[in-house]
Every structure is written in C-alpha cells, then in structure tokens.
Image (cartoon, rainbow, N blue to C red):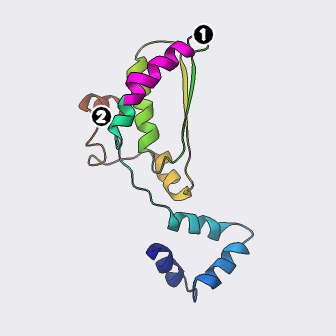
Amino acid sequence: NGMLKNYILRNGYNGFDEYMEKVEHDPAGKEARNLINALTTNHTYFMREFEHMEYLRQVVLPKLKVKEAARKDLRIWSAASSTGEEPYTIAMVLQDFFGLEHGWDTKILATDISTKVLQQAMLGIYSEEQLKNLPEQWKRHFFK
C-alpha cells in the first residue's frame, strides 16, 4: 500500500517492521487507529448505488412496513458509512417512503472502521458538488 509506505516514511520510521513494532506496543492505540486510517479506502458519494436505494424503497421497505406494522420500529445498520453519504441517503429514502405517516420509530446506526471519516460524517457538511446526484426536492428539503 503506497499510502502506508508514505505514512511510515513521513513519520520517521525506518521501515515496516519498526512501524509495526510501534503499533503493537502503543498502549493508547493511537498508531493502530492511524494504521486503519491509512489502509482504508473511503470512496463514497450520495446515491452511489442508486439501484440499491431503489430496491430498498420499492421492495424492502414495503415488506418491512407490513412485517413491523404492529411495532412500527425499524433499525438499519450502515456498516461502512465512510463520510456519511450512505446513511444520510438511507435517512432521506426513509423520510421519502414514510412521508407524514406518524408513529414510525426509525433509527440508522452508521459505523466505519476509520475514525477520520466518521468525524467528517458527524459534521454533515457537504459541497454542492457532493450533492449533485440527489433529487432537487431532497436538496431543498434536507440541506441548508
């Protein structure tokens, strides 16, 4: 991994073995987090997998709406959420699907192995360019 090699050299280590020694013996785990951040690829954007979101809206949510009708409780886990585009898109799909229907408790758990991108995701700040694939009405309704 070129990014890891650059990180190792940039931070004054003589090589991979010396760096791994530091990772393994860092009681605070700071270097392990840095290693994870250096190794992970965080390529994402809004509506990246349009077909998946359409499948969620047209197939999965109607089935869950019937299955969970008594409890009106829905939990979704976005496991590799990167900078947040996927869980935010799921949230918009849920809002669009359920509309003004009251009583549904919907929650999304957004996680990622990279702490760096999760910090970005928690800010929820995106450029106009990042929002380009979203429907206009979603841009107006869900973003400032």
According to the image, label 1 marks what residue? 70
Q: Residue at x 52, y 58 (%)?
A: 116
| Quadrant the C terminus occupies | top left
Left or right: where 106 falls relative to 26:
left
Of the image marks 2 and 1, the number of the one nearer the N terminus: 1
Could you say where residue 7 lies in the image, as x and y percent from the top left?
A: 50, 77
Tell me the CA gap for discs 2 and 1. 32 Å
Look at the image and give the residue range highlighted in magenta. Answer: 55-69
Residue neighbourhood size for the residue with mark 2, other residues' Cα within 10 Å, grouped as few (<14), some (14–19), many (≥20): some
Report whether residue 141 is seen: yes
How many numbered discs sit on the rendered protein?
2
Label 2: element kind: helix
Residue neighbourhood size for the residue with mark 1, other residues' Cα within 10 Å, grouped as few (<14), some (14–19), many (≥20): few
**Three-letter amino acid code at disc 2?**
Lys
Label 1: element kind: loop
Q: Residue at x 40, y 20 (%)?
A: 97
Query: Which residue, as the protein is rendered here, is positioned at the far top?
Result: 70
In the picture shown, does residue 70 fall above or below 115? above
Occupied quadrant, residue 58: top left
Left or right: where 140 falls relative to 85:
left
Magenta stretch: dominant secondary structure: helix
Label 2 or label 1, whichever lies nearer to me, is: 1
Q: Is residue 59 magenta?
A: yes
According to the image, label 2 marks what residue? 139
Looking at the image, which is closer to me, 82 or 62? 62
**Three-letter amino acid code at disc 1?**
Ala
Q: Residue at x 34, y 35 (%)?
A: 51
Could you say where residue 35 lies in the image, as x and y percent from the top left?
A: 57, 69
